[in-house]
Image: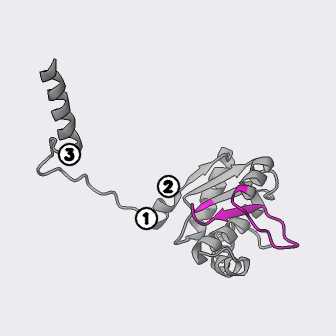
Amino acid sequence: MKKAIALVVVLMGLATSGIAQVLVNPAVPAAKELKPGDVLTQSYVVQGATPRQETLLRTQMQAMQSDVIPSRIIFVPHWKYLYAAKMYKLHVPTGMASKMFTHLASRSVFIDDDYYGGDESLGYWMAHELGHLAANSADENDAEKAAKPYRKRLQGAQLVSMH
């Protein structure tokens, strides 16, 4: 019995120390040629959206060609949006309403599914949220300034009308 326990301890020690079977010359799989938009559409997660919302959002994000993208975009009902805003201590400037917000530390965008304004304004406001990420700032003026080129690209792709 003591030999069996000793064998298990030795094997566990070898496994955790990294001594294991290693390929000396592993074959590297052929890299697929990617277009600039390919990575963008696959490198973030969209949660809580309908298939139609997700398709529209991904199309708009691809048209905006942002260098900085969120790690996840979350559509939530109004009560969850309010809860998330409270948990992340969102400060909405006086006289403004919040339909979306970006949590910079996690690079997450929360969208109030009940109040974001529909397909027409999704890209417009998403450009603003991308502006927060691009400027790495919670300041609304910085976000608006950074959102201008994204909105121009959206308008050029005829995916959004300007407000």
Answer whether residue 130 is magenta in the image. Answer: no
Answer with left or right where residue 16 lies relative to residue 151: left
State the residue position of label 2.
42
Q: Position of residue 49 (x, y in %)?
A: 67, 47
Magenta: main secondary structure:
loop
Tag 1 and tag 2, C-beta contact below 8 Å: no
Q: Position of residue 74 (x, y in %)?
A: 65, 52
Which numbered mark, 3 or 2, is in the foreground of this view? 3
SS of the residue at dot 1? loop
Amino acid bearing label 3: Ser
In the picture shown, does residue 79 fall above or below 140?
Answer: above
Mark 2: few/some/many CA within 10 Å (<14, 14-19, 20+): few
Answer with left or right where residue 14 lies relative to residue 86: left
Instruction: Give the residue drawn at x 75%, y 51%.
Output: 83
Rounded to the nearest whole Å, what is the CA distance between mark 1 and mark 2?
12 Å
Instruction: Give the residue drawn at x 65%, y 45%.
Output: 51
Upstream in sequence: badge 1 or badge 2: 1
- The quarter of the picture where residue 10 lies is top left
Report the disc number at residue 35.
1
Amino acid bearing label 1: Lys
**Total residue callouts:** 3
Instruction: Give the residue drawn at x 81%, y 51%.
Output: 114
Specify the quadrant that holds the N terminus: top left
Upstream in sequence: badge 3 or badge 2: 3
State the residue position of label 3.
17
